[in-house]
Amino acid sequence: MVEIIGILKSPTYKEAASLIKKGVASKATVIVLGKCSVDYIGRSESRLTEGERIIIIKEDGAFLVHRPQGHSPVNWQPETSAIEVRETDLGLEITAVRRSPREIVSVFLPSIYFVMAVKLKDKGEFIMYLDEHEIRDLLFEKPELLEEGLTIVEKEKRIQSNLIDLFGYDKQGRPVIIEIKRVTASKDAVLQLYRYVGLYHKYYGVKPRGILVAPQITQATIESIEKLGLEYKAINIQKLWNLKKSLMKKKSIEGRSLLDYFK
Amino acid sequence: MVEIIGILKSPTYKEAASLIKKGVASKATVIVLGKCSVDYIGRSESRLTEGERIIIIKEDGAFLVHRPQGHSPVNWQPETSAIEVRETDLGLEITAVRRSPREIVSVFLPSIYFVMAVKLKDKGEFIMYLDEHEIRDLLFEKPELLEEGLTIVEKEKRIQSNLIDLFGYDKQGRPVIIEIKRVTASKDAVLQLYRYVGLYHKYYGVKPRGILVAPQITQATIESIEKLGLEYKAINIQKLWNLKKSLMKKKSIEGRSLLDYFK
DNA sequence: TATTATATCTCGGGT
DNA sequence: ACCCGAGGTATAATA
């Protein structure tokens, strides 16, 4: 069962301040509902006038102010060095300070409807399937999916602090630079590839082929690819995903049979 | 005072399901605390194993699953076409469906600690100061801040679906393309500017100057700028902000005196 | 809907 | 600490 440090409905400023402080001090997660205005000064500056919102302070100091609509918090602090709670005659003030970059979010609450402090235990494992890194690994293992006779010799090849996704040689022995996108590729991707091709050319004195690998590509991008002398190769993410799954299955079977020897 | 539709501590699956459904139906904000696992299928796929988390469903269908650490939700849905709540013998299942792109987040809760549904009224105005757009407007008004004798003739100049931040002519009458960043500029910014310069050259047959305007720039970027024949001009965001404030003040005084005539 | 560019982007990994 | 690149990026503006 979860450990609830405290729940308050329509608390006084003093009661609210006390529970919030207690929650923050004991590295709990604190949830506050109230009417508030919010000021932010840091990389930019903003001001949010009064309204009813949810404020969340997490155990690591992450600080969020959520409006009743939208995915993103209206104000936030990714991590904080200090959370200060101050009561005045007119309301409660919660200030979240971040050291670097120096930023301050200050919430002023004239009305507090609800405060809760709770210790959440979360050791769950998060697994994301088929991100760009996994696609890269798959194509490294199976370059024939891209082109017959292609040999990949290096993953994340570094040229002057730039990272080339995949590097290898084609059937004719020409160097090939491959840039992978797991979503629709736009101009940025082409420019990235173009930069790598140029860098390689300057560095090694040989002009390599440049191949942009992505499930889709915008129209303007396909045009600029041709103009820049680069190539585009479409991949099917779903098929790669199926391949990945079958490889995982195979591996787990192999693994199991291997373990069996030790039983 | 805020309108609380319901608060439940350690509810049964049935009680929890009822309040969540009621909250979603009446476009309230719903907060759930519980032990859960989360599956996501859509642009990618992920699985999160069991742990104690906060689930928030907003009035517009925005859906968030927050772990006790970190700024970002571990799973989410920016907007949803449907929120389904289903009770089984083993737990509660909340499914958030997004139509386009087709995505599904499914939360399975074997333990529910807390449920709250509340109608938040938030008409607050959010003002963000000095975003990139405002810097562009300021420099459009005061090009002398960038260079003596510079004339800006166009904001957001369009060349083949590409947008040039500022376009003008220098004292010698040479065309100037200006790309603005409000944070430290990196290679991306240079390539963006380089692309615009190239496009202009091809389109109009004249090679323009390209100036990257930013408060800071990375070391590798300053090198590539010089290699590409482009320029960098540092700006002080704080000074621009002060200028903006003084201009706003001036305008408000002018505005007030104008209004006075009608009193 | 598709495309483009910004963001207090965040986050992770490398040097 | 800087720098780079990915992200289920989200979000707004625009064709």
Image (cartoon, coloured by chain):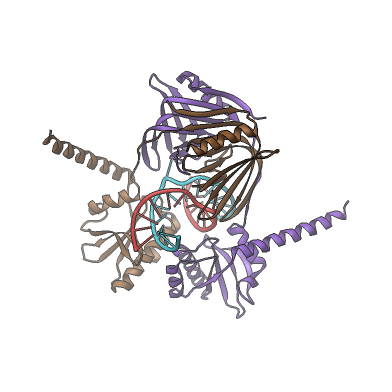
Chain colours: A purple, B brown, C cyan, D red
Q: Is residue A219 above or below residue B66?
A: below
Q: Position of residue B233 (x, y in %)?
A: 32, 55
The image quadrant that residue A107 belongs to is: top left
Q: In the current view of this chain or complex, which residue is farthest to the bottom? A: A172
- Residue B140 locus on image (x, y percent): 25, 54
Instruction: Place residue B227 in its image quadrant.
Output: bottom left
Q: Does residue A81 appear to the left or right of B193 in the view shown?
A: right
The picture places residue B1, in percent across and down from the top left corner, at 42, 25
Judge left or right: residue A19 versus residue A45.
Answer: right
Horizontal and vertical percent position of residue C7:
41, 48
Of B151 and A149, which appears nearest the observer? Answer: A149
Residue B78 visible in the current orientation:
no
Q: Residue at x 62, y 59 (%)?
A: A134
Which quadrant holds residue B218? bottom left
Query: What residue is shown at x 47% (from left), y 25% (from top)?
Result: A113
Residue A96 seen by the camera: yes
Answer above or below: position of A57 versus B237. Answer: above
Q: Residue at x 63, y 65 (%)?
A: A239
> Total label count?
0
- Quadrant occupied by the N terminus of chain A: top right
Residue displayed at 50% across by 40% down = A78
A38 versus B225 height, above or below: above
Q: Nearer the viewer, residue B59 or B37?
A: B59
Residue B202 or residue A251, whichever sits in front: A251
